[in-house]
Image (cartoon, rainbow, N blue to C red):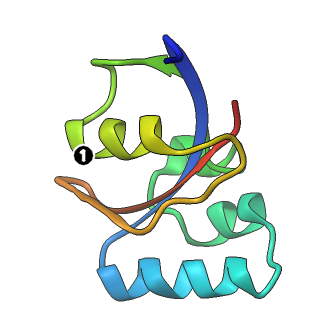
Amino acid sequence: MADKIKCSHILVKKQGEALAVQERLKAGEKFGKLAKELSIDGGSAKRDGSLGYFGRGKMVKPFEDAAFRLQVGEVSEPVKSEFGYHVIKRLG
């Protein structure tokens, strides 16, 4: 298992918003474009949603668990955390 992974995410307040993000991704819209447009995580949104590389213990547990289960290139179902709902894409 990887010690560190690279992910991007789109953070929204409501589950319905996260589901709408997934639909737009399925329709072919670019993850980075949607992150800039919709994510409430201002820091990562400016970088196309990129969180860079991180290891275990660096992110909130629900996010970390979901991110480490993803294959490279895969996008998660909405993941609820104390910050809202994340749509996560594993990049590396």
Tell me residue 51's x, y (percent): 56, 34
What residue is disc 1 on?
A: 62
Q: Is residue 52 visible?
A: no
Residue drawn at point x = 68 percent, y = 40 percent: 72
Q: Residue at x 57, y 78 (%)?
A: 22
Q: Give above or below for 23 relative to 25.
A: below
Q: Nearer the viewer, residue 33 or 68?
A: 68
Q: Name, please, the residue furthest toward the left.
A: 82
Q: Answer above or below: position of 76 versus 5.
A: below
From the viewer's side, name the closer residue of 15 and 69. 69
In the picture, measured across the screen, residue 31 lies left or right of residue 74, that is right
* On screen, residue 77 above or below 53: below
Q: Indicate the position of residue 33 as horizontal and vertical percent values.
A: 77, 66
Q: Quadrant of residue 8?
A: top right
Instruction: Tell me the element at label 1.
Output: helix
Look at the image and tell me whether residue 87 can be seen.
Answer: yes
Relative depth, front residue between 70 and 40: 70
Tag count: 1
- In this orientation, which residue lies closer to the viewer: 33 or 42? 33
Q: Residue at image x 59%, y 38%? A: 7
Q: Residue at x 34, y 36 (%)?
A: 64
